[in-house]
Image (spheres, coloured by chain):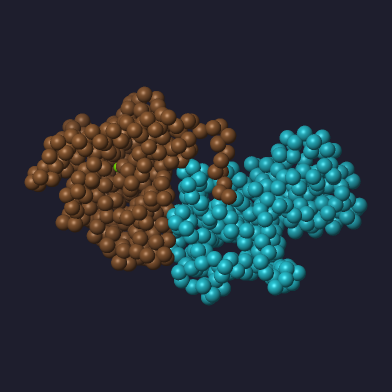
Chain colours: A cyan, B brown
């Protein structure tokens, strides 16, 4: 199989394909979730693909125990909403256990979870709380925005010897795109320049990558050349690629559907602002395009109002550049 | 008990004595400022850890709680590295990153103490799942308190372990208090073991200060687990001799007479075991006991010397082991 062969796959199918390939390769990998994914259950069945009681806290802890005993568990929390009942296991146990015990053993775990709104599912089921996890040194965090990235990053997540939270953007689940066949793993900590440009750097996350790309098209029509960067992993964060882009463009905008308070965009903005060279290169203040500071409402017009989109990106970037 | 040779019985006494003397030294070190933070002594509960761990092998796994020194020692942890960890030194089990509440030795299947009440129960259940998938007959044992039996992880984990017939033994050390909350007020059933019925597994009550009774109950539960028949909940009724922690200014709500009663030799698990061995013709002479006591004291002294000789960790090591390679 050559790496140049590509197929068109959905984001969700690309993730399942990546997991299945890894499970074929390594018998220590197993998958637990309160609803077993059909294709994995069909191919692997018990005991490697388990449908479990609705007990996310126990599942999260059990993954830690099984990992410490030599397995490589994958736990799908499903909506990120449901992992909050497992916060002790995530915050106090998984994130710290390697360090706290002096690095005695490793805990290779993937926690899969779906984030984001847009499905009219109201406040509890529409969250994008990845920045909460950015405080938890000891976890790696992936947040792919395309089918190809999703497959390449899930493979890396499974091979990593640390607990990884793998955020899957619900809005993108059905989106299709080219996915290279075969064993293509994407390293963590490598941002991807989704579109090259010269006038402004737009760092965007998950669904907002696609909104930023659409915005870049509109901006091009008015003569603004936007570079769109997807960090792809929030821990480790590839600040170098963002920094290099800012040095080139002199303008930084950040787009995320999460609210701006203590967010990923706040963190990236601070890192750029505290870098003397990058700060000196900035010709205008940093602009953030975020969700509004409210729980996500249900009624369609309200929900759409709370989330940012391509229009808000275009407006903010044009204001930033004064054109 | 029939399976336990006199030698083995004396070894169990020696382990219990080691735990008691280790805790006394830890308490002394805490008061002297050589040991930092918080120390929860296991004194008075030694028969539980020793009785249970006597049924286990190195490939079996245990997990502990905040009161974890006894479980470590009973599982065979190295006293030197334990003491060095309490002293915050580079040669401690966790290179000085863990301290009293976070000692682990993964090589001997001790998956760690835990500062979160009930925090280890689901982790050991996962180790049980791993043991089941390995299919080699290993078991996983979780130690936790009466207080932890009121927390969610206890119920979620036992429910899953029962449903999946995982080879796990849940050992509730009911020392009748969770800090200053009596179990009589927080556990609505007469016994923690009664809760096993809700999960369709055996709930066994045992005198936690009788090391042989604990051994027998654990041996049966371990055999059941190894045979693939699933988990057991053992409730060991016991009592802690010390206040909740070694901090001196800490209120202790336990009635003085109650504490005093449990310290008496007919309740204290160590004098009870000594009396029993001495009553059995020729199993423990006064001289043997004195020699054992001296040997244990020497072990503790050596551990303290090791700890004191070990350097404090380098400041650069603060950033080591944040992530695994
Ligand atoms: C989740 C959580 N809540 C509160 C505490 C504070 N705390 C530490 S030990 C303890 C009591 C635990 O009682 P029990 O489980 O009976 O164990 P024991 O101390 O009696 O051995 C409490 C409340 C904690 N460590 N974790
Ligand atoms: Mg208690």
Residue B194 can be seen in this image: no
B255 left or right, relative to A94: left
| Residue at figure coordinates x 45%, y 69% from the top left | A47
Residue placed furthest toward the bottom: A42
| Residue at figure coordinates x 47%, y 30% from the top left | B311
Q: Is residue A71 above or below residue A90?
A: below
Could you say which is closer to the camera, residue A115 or residue B223?
B223
Residue placed furthest toward the right: A223
B81 left or right, relative to B263: right
| Residue at figure coordinates x 51%, y 43% from the top left | A99
Could you say which is closer to the camera, residue B18 or residue B231?
B18
Could you say which is closer to the camera, residue B317 or residue A270?
B317
Residue B242 drawn at (x, y percent): 27, 33
Q: How many marks?
A: 0
Residue A135 drawn at (x, y percent): 59, 43
Residue B97 can be seen in this image: yes
Q: Is residue B213 above or below residue A250?
A: below
Residue A238 drawn at (x, y percent): 70, 47
The image quarter in which residue B81 lies: top left
| Residue at figure coordinates x 80%, y 58% from the top left | A214
Could you say which is closer to the camera, residue A140 or residue A262?
A140
Q: Which quadrant: the N terminus of chain B?
A: bottom left
Residue B143 drawn at (x, y percent): 33, 49
Residue placed furthest toward the top: B32
B295 left or right, relative to B96: left
């Amino acid at each position: 199989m050559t790496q140049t062969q590509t197929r068109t796959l959905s984001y969700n199918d690309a993730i399942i394909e990546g997991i299945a390939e890894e499970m074929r390769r390594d018998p220590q990998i197993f998958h637990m979730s309160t609803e077993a994914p059909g294709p994995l259950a069909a191919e692997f069945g018990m005991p490697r693909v388990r449908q479990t009681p609705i007990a996310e806290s126990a599942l999260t802890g059990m993954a830690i125990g099984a990992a410490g005993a030599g397995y490589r568990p994958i736990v799908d929390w499903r909506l990120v909403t449901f992992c909050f009942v497992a916060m002790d296991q995530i915050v106090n146990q998984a994130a710290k256990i390697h360090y706290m015990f002096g690095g005695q053993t490793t805990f290779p775990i993937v926690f899969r979870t779906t984030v984001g709104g847009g499905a009219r599912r109201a406040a509890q089921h529409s969250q994008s709380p990845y920045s909460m996890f950015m405080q938890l040194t000891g976890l790696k965090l992936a947040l792919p925005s395309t089918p190809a990235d999703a497959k390449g990053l899930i493979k890396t997540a499974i091979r990593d010897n640390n607990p990884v939270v793998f955020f899957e953007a619900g809005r993108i689940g059905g989106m299709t795109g080219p996915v290279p066949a075969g064993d293509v793993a994407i390293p963590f900590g490598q941002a991807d320049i989704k579109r090259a440009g010269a006038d402004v750097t737009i760092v965007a996350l998950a669904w907002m990558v696609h909104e930023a790309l659409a915005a870049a098209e509109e901006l091009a029509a008015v003569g603004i050349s936007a570079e769109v960067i997807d960090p792809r992993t929030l821990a480790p964060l590839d600040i170098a690629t963002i920094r290099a882009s800012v040095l080139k463009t002199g303008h930084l905008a950040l787009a995320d559907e999460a609210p701006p308070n203590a967010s990923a965009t706040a963190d990236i903005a601070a890192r750029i602002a505290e870098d003397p060279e990058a700060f000196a290169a900035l010709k205008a203040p940093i602009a953030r395009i975020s969700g509004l500071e409210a729980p996500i409402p249900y009624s369609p017009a309200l929900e759409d109002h709370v989330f940012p989109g391509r229009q808000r990106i275009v407006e903010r970037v044009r204001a930033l550049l004064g054109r | 008990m029939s399976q336990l040779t006199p030698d083995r019985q004396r070894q169990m006494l020696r382990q219990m004595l080691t735990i008691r003397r280790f805790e006394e030294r830890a308490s002394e070190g805490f008061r002297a400022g050589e040991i930092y933070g918080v120390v929860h002594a296991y004194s008075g509960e030694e028969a539980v850890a020793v009785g249970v761990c006597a049924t286990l092998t190195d490939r079996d796994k245990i997990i502990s709680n905040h009161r974890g020194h006894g479980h470590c020692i009973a599982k065979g942890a190295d006293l030197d590295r334990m003491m060095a960890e309490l002293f915050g030194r580079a040669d401690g089990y966790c290179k000085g990153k863990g301290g009293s509440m976070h000692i682990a030795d993964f090589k001997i299947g001790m998956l760690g103490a835990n500062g979160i009440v009930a925090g280890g129960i689901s982790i050991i259940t996962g180790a049980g799942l791993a043991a089941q998938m390995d299919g080699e007959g290993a078991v996983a044992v979780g130690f936790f308190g009466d207080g932890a039996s009121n927390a969610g992880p206890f119920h979620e984990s036992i429910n899953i372990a029962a449903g999946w017939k995982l080879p796990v033994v849940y050992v509730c050390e009911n020392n009748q208090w969770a800090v200053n909350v009596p179990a009589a007020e927080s556990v609505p059933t007469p016994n923690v073991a009664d809760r096993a019925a809700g999960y369709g597994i055996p709930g066994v009550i045992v005198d936690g200060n009788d090391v042989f009774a604990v051994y027998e109950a654990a041996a049966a539960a371990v055999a059941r687990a190894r045979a693939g028949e699933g988990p057991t909940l053992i409730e060991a009724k016991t009592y802690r001799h010390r206040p909740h922690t070694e901090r001196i200014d800490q209120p202790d709500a336990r009635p003085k007479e109650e504490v005093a009663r449990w310290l008496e030799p007919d309740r204290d698990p160590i004098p009870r075991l000594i009396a029993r061995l001495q009553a059995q013709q020729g199993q423990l002479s006064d001289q043997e006991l004195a020699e054992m006591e001296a040997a244990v004291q020497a072990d503790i002294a050596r551990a303290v010397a090791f700890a004191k000789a070990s350097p404090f960790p380098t400041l650069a090591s603060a950033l080591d082991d944040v992530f695994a390679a």
